[in-house]
C-alpha cells in the first residue's frame, strides 16, 4: 500500500500543468486551490516550471481583493519558489524556508497583483507546494477633485466603507502633486493597519503603492502624480488632510490635528526662523470646534488663526493672543499660523448641550 501511494502521488504530480486563475473563478467569497486539491500540500514533478500570476481585478466602480496563502513544501536542494509581491519586492523560498508547509499570507488590495514561480530541477525530490486564493468584493470610489482657494481638503476614509465589502477606496485628483498626512489623534490605531494602502495615483494608474505604515515612515508623504488613493479594510478612524504641493513646499510647516470628542493638544514654539509651523485643525464629524484652554508662554505672541489652509484665499479670523477660552469656532476647520509664539492649546469638538 505504501509503494502504491507513493506511485500515485508521483503520477498525480507529473500531471500538473500551469493553469492560471480564470476570470469566471473570481467572485465574492470564491476560493481557488492551486494546483488543485483542498489547500493542502500537493506534490511536484521534476522539471516543473510555472509562473502563477494572481490578480485582484478592479474597475472604476467595483473590484475584488485577494487573500493569498502560499505553503512551501520544497524538499529538493535545487528546487525553489520565487515570489514577487504587489510592491515588486522579491522573495526566495527553498528547502530551508518553511519546510512542512508553513503558510505565508499575502493580501492583495483591488487593482494589484503578485506572482509566484515554482521551479523543480531534473531529479524528483518529493517537493510540494500549494496556493489558496480567496476573493472578497471591494467598493471602488468615489473620485474627488481637490478643492482650491480657501477650502480644506480632508476625509475620514473609514466613512466610505460599506457592509458586504472588505476594502473601500477613495481617490483625490488635483492640478499638482498632493501632500497628505494623518491628523494627530489621541488613539492612532489606523497607523498600525498592515493591509491599509496608499497609492500614488489611481486604481488604474499606479505610480507607487505602499502600506500606510510605510508611507508614514518614509515622509514627507508627497506624490509624484496629481492623484492619491487611500484603501482601508478596517473600521478605524482614518483622518487624512491634504494640501497641494504649492502650499506644502513653501514656508509653511503643516501638521494636521483632529478635533475629537475629548480635548487634544496642539501648539509649540517656533524654533525655525524663516518657517511658519501651521496647525490645520479639522473636526471630521462636522462644524463646531471648541478651544478649551490656551496658554501663551512667550512674552510676545505672533500667531494667527485663519479660515482655511495657508494660502492667499484664507482670511484672518483672529489673533491667537486675543482669544479668551473657552472659545467657540462655528467652523469645521481652521489653521493656526505660528509666526513667533510659544503656546499650548487644547481643542475638542463642539456639541450643543
Image: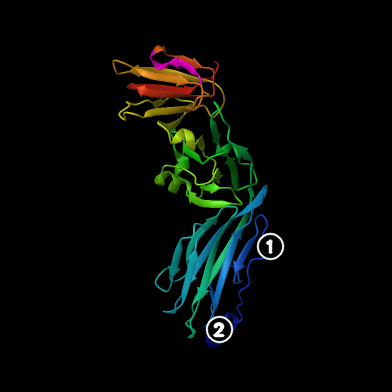
Give the camera-side residue of 331 and 132.
331
Return the disc, 2 or 1, that comes first in the chain's sequence. 2
Mark 1 — residue? 23
Residue 10 circle label: 2
Q: Residue at x 47, y 82 (%)?
A: 125
Q: Residue at x 46, y 74 (%)?
A: 80
Q: Is residue 129 one of those drawn in magenta? A: no
Where is residue 189 shown, x and y percent of the image? 46, 40
Where is residue 133 shown, x and y percent of the image? 59, 62
Packing grade of label 1 (10 A; few <14, some 14-19, many >=20) is: few
Where is residue 104 shown, x and y percent of the image? 48, 62
Q: Residue at x 38, y 29 (%)?
A: 277
Where is residue 162 shown, x and y percent of the image? 63, 42
Q: Quadrant of the C terminus?
A: top right
Instruction: Tell me if 298 is positioned left or right of 336 in this view.
Output: left
Residue 260 seen in the figure: no
Instruction: Tell me if 279 is positioned left or right of 238 in this view.
Output: left
Q: Residue furthest left?
A: 299
Residue 245 circle label: none
Q: Which residues are magenta?
A: 315-321
Q: Residue at x 55, y 35 (%)?
A: 156
Packing grade of label 2 (10 A; few <14, some 14-19, many >=20) is: some
The correct choice, above or below, for 11 with respect to 347 in the image is below
Instruction: Tell me if 345 is positioned left or right of 290 in this view.
Output: left
Please report contact status of discs 2 and 1: CB closer than 8 Å, yes or no: no
Q: Secondary structure at mark 1?
A: helix
Rounded to the nearest whole Å, what is the CA distance between mark 2 and mark 1?
Answer: 30 Å
Q: Secondary structure at mark 2?
A: helix
Give the mark toward the camera: 2 or 1: 1
The correct choice, above or below, for 84 with respect to 161 in the image is below
* Scheme of image coloration: rainbow
Give the camera-side residue of 207 and 214.
207
Amino acid at each position: 500500500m505504501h509503494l502504491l501511494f507513493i506511485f500515485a502521488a508521483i503520477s498525480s504530480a507529473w500531471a500538473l500543468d500551469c493553469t492560471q486563475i480564470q476570470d469566471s473563478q473570481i467572485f465574492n467569497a470564491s476560493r481557488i486551490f492551486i494546483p488543485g486539491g483542498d489547500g493542502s500540500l500537493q506534490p511536484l514533478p521534476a522539471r516543473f516550471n510555472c509562473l502563477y500570476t494572481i490578480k485582484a481585478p478592479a474597475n472604476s466602480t467595483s473590484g475584488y481583493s485577494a487573500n493569498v496563502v502560499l505553503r512551501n513544501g520544497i524538499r529538493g536542494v535545487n528546487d525553489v519558489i520565487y515570489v514577487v509581491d504587489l510592491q515588486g519586492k522579491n522573495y526566495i523560498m527553498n528547502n530551508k524556508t518553511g519546510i512542512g508547509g508553513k503558510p505565508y499570507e499575502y493580501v492583495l488590495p483591488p487593482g494589484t497583483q503578485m506572482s509566484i514561480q515554482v521551479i523543480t530541477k531534473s531529479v524528483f525530490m518529493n517537493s510540494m507546494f500549494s496556493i489558496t486564493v480567496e476573493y472578497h468584493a471591494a467598493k471602488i470610489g468615489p473620485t474627488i477633485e481637490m478643492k482650491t482657494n480657501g477650502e480644506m481638503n480632508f476625509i475620514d476614509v473609514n466613512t466610505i466603507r460599506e457592509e458586504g465589502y472588505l476594502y473601500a477606496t477613495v481617490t483625490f485628483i488635483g492640478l499638482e502633486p498632493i501632500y497628505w498626512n494623518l491628523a494627530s489623534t489621541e488613539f492612532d490605531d489606523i497607523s498600525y493597519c498592515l493591509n491599509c494602502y496608499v497609492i500614488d495615483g489611481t486604481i488604474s494608474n499606479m505610480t507607487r503603492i505602499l502600506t500606510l505604515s510605510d508611507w508614514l515612515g518614509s515622509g514627507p508623504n508627497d506624490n509624484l502624480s496629481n492623484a492619491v488613493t487611500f484603501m482601508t479594510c478596517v473600521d478605524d478612524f482614518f483622518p487624512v488632510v491634504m494640501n497641494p504641493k504649492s502650499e506644502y513646499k513653501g514656508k509653511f510647516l503643516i501638521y494636521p490635528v483632529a478635533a475629537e470628542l475629548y480635548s487634544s493638544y496642539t501648539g509649540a514654539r517656533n524654533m525655525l526662523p524663516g518657517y511658519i509651523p501651521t496647525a490645520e485643525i479639522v473636526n471630521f464629524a462636522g462644524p463646531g470646534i471648541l478651544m478649551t484652554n490656551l496658554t501663551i508662554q512667550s512674552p510676545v505672541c505672533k500667531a494667527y488663526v485663519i479660515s482655511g489652509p495657508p494660502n492667499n484665499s484664507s482670511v484672518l479670523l483672529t489673533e491667537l493672543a486675543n482669544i479668551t477660552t473657552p472659545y467657540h469656532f462655528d467652523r469645521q476647520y481652521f489653521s493656526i499660523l505660528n509666526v513667533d509664539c510659544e503656546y499650548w492649546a487644547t481643542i475638542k469638538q463642539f456639541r450643543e448641550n
